[in-house]
Image (spheres, helix red, strand yellow):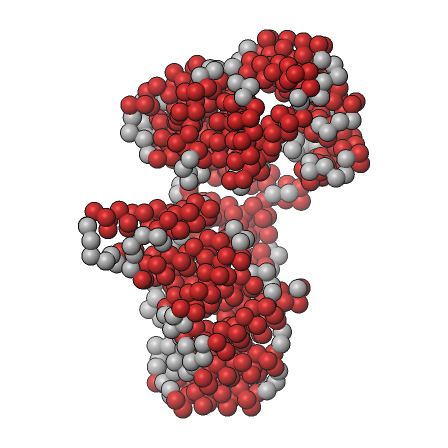
Amino acid sequence: MLQSITYLKRISISLPIITLFFFICIGTSTNVFAQVQPKDDPAVRIQTLNAIQDANDHYYERRYAEAIKAYQTLLKTKLTQTQKDSMRLMLGQSYAKLGEDVEARRIFSEIINENPDGPYATQAVHQLSNLYRQRYQFREAIILCKQILKQHPDSAAAAVAAYLTAYYQYVEGKYEDAMKSYKFFLDNFPNSIYRSSAISSLVRLYTQNERYGDAEKLITERIKLNPTDTTLLEELANLYQQQGKYQRALELYKGVLEKNPANTSIRQKLGSLYAELGNKEKAIAEWKKLVAGETDQYQQLGTIYLSHKMYAEAINAFQLAIRANPRYGYLYTQLAAVYKIQGHVEKAASTYIDGLQGVGPSGSQREAIWGGMLEIYQGDQQKPLREKLIAQFQKSHRAAPRNLNIALTLGELFFYADQLDDALKTFTQLHSNYSSYTDATLERFGNVLERNQNSSAIEFYKTLLQLSRDSRILTNTRYKLAKLYQNAEQWEMAVNTLKETNTNSAVFINSQLLLAQIQLHGLHDPKAAHTTLQPLMTRRLISDQFIETQMILGECHLLLKRHTLAREVLTPIADSTNRASATARKLIGDSYFFEKDFGNAVTNYRKVALISKSDKLTNDALERLALIQDNTDYFAIPITDYINALQLYLTGDIEAAITQCEDTISLYPKSQIVDDVWMLLGLIYLSQNAYGDALHSYQQIVSQEGPLAAAALTQIAEIYQKKRDFPNALDTYTTLLTTYPDSSIVPRARQQLDKLTKLMKNPETDSP
């Protein structure tokens, strides 16, 4: 397989052609939906077209199971033949995406066999062979293509199959076979759109195998058929160049340019050939002709010089380009790149700093410059450089405190040196004179910190809320800040932040939905969540917002013991092909579970396991299934008590939930559900940050060495991590790995163990 991957890399130049064809095909398949349906009711035609678009939306949004159902339904309706073929192709692709290759092969084969000269047949050949190619099963792909070629000779499908046969042989490293197959393809399918690609591949193969005469003969024969084809002339010149026949290559390049002086590709290659021959003056002369009259001629020259390792010339060209366009950040990054290649770090840093001053406050341009700057600015070895630059700009800032560029650059220098308090102080001082630029900078760096999961993002967003007067920024920042509070389990802070959202803002609906989620799952207050949803009932909601509203509403009813009402709200979603259907089905199962109707609960949990592609959702359903099936002792009284405790916890009655758990453990110490009750008790204590009590609960499970012991050890390790007791966390993960090596939790434990090991070597970094 490694050999195949190596071969694939070596011939990657021919892949774009196949990729391009694939996307052309996809474009074709989407455009046919606008074609006229068979004559019938216009309303029906519009309804059909909308249904087709909905089915495609499922596919492009990666909801492949839903797409399959939609396509299968549509194929039973009245459609044009083109629409049917297009839809079948998409149906096959949906099966392929889900790994259901048998069904995908059946559909693609039917399309090919029914009309091997049809446009969708050629696409089907690609898709069918791709089922093997994406698994690096090139031998199987070759056999398939040869079968199609034999079954449908002289057809459009055969042309594609013949080309792909040669291509896969090339990829697999069977060069002799590939050369024969490419020649067969060119002789038998001279009008194929893959002709040029096949010629290039065959020439490359001949050249790699030092069959220069065959390569030259192939090209010259094609030139006779099409003497104006400059691509073939380029191929021949390249061939001469590889053989060291430089004079003949030069003559060809010059000949093409005499006939077509505007051919930029040939002129650039002519310059490259002069450079290869050591004639730098002539090379530069050709390249200057290439860019003459262009507004960015110096930039283009700099790029060409850099690609040929002519560093002095590249530096001069980029410097001239910067003089002509000092506000274009890309030029500074290119000039700095040349300095970095030469090892001139100080000059590179100086160039980046000049760029930050030159481009002004534009966020996107500054980000691009810092992208290059960070390679030489971060790390302990560059600490003296950071300190030098910060000292330099502190001095400049004191001399000109209102200079926007200097203040921005100083703040950025602090930020990327991880001196976040100093950065925030600098930006805050700047705000009174340049509010809009400072708002944008605080927002940008808040986003960076958020992406990096750095808790300081909260301080940047809080500062932005205090300083900004821009309603859009304030609204968006409140929403982001609330999400960060949610992730940090600072529920009250999240709720207070969201309650300040303007009811007329664009994100009000999403803010209310987030608020309801936090009240429901963070504060365990379904009544408050239900109240939050009330204003949304009279609003026009888009589809996703409506479904989320109904889902939260259904869960509120569930936790408020309105089980029948919960099912009325959730059933339409569960019965649909919507992405939330599995979650709705799980909640319906919960409604029966909380009613102690275990038969219906089991039925619905099993449906979740069948339809859900979400591991967590499936695991939750399977855990409830196991809980029901494994705990029928004592006339199911212990499991009933467990359910009561769970309901009390989910509705925020923490003390009662703890009491119920303790009573159940005390009354039924030998019950099968005791470990589950200890797990629930640990979760409840964790929600209250009572780490000692939570540890005690999980340790009871570990001592019994039952099925939940590995999960309990994981919880213990994570508690130690939260407390920053890394040695104990390390020991706990090690115990987990050695005691339960076959547990499904092991991969995550290994990952956390690696992070902890690195963290203990470098304590200054954040905890995992």
**Number of on-image labels:** 0
Q: Is residue 702 left or right of residue 23?
A: right
Q: Can you give x and y, in whole percent of width and height, for residue 153 in the image? A: 45, 79
What quarter of the picture does the C terminus occupy?
top right
Of 272 and 49, the residue lying toward us? 49
Residue at 52 percent across and 27 percent down: it is 600
Of 484 and 274, the residue lying toward us? 484
Which image quarter: residue 405?
Answer: top left
Q: Can you give x and y, in whole percent of width and height, for residue 38 in the image? A: 23, 58
Which image quarter: residue 653?
Answer: top right
Residue at 69 percent across and 40 percent down: it is 747
Q: Can you give x and y, in whole percent of width and height, for residue 280 in the image? A: 51, 76
Residue at 41 percent across and 77 percent down: it is 155
What quarter of the picture does the N terminus occupy?
bottom right
- In the displayed structure, would residue 528 be above or below residue 344? above
Residue at 23 percent across and 48 percent down: it is 44
Q: Is residue 336 left or right of residue 124?
A: right
Q: Is residue 463 left or right of residue 740?
A: left
Of 262 and 611, the residue lying toward us? 611
Which image quarter: residue 472?
Answer: top left
Q: Can you give x and y, in whole percent of width and height, for residue 563 in the image? A: 46, 19
- In the displayed structure, would residue 56 be above or below residue 549? below
| Residue 461 visible at all | no
| Residue 71 visible at all | yes
- In the displayed structure, would residue 371 be above or below residue 148? above
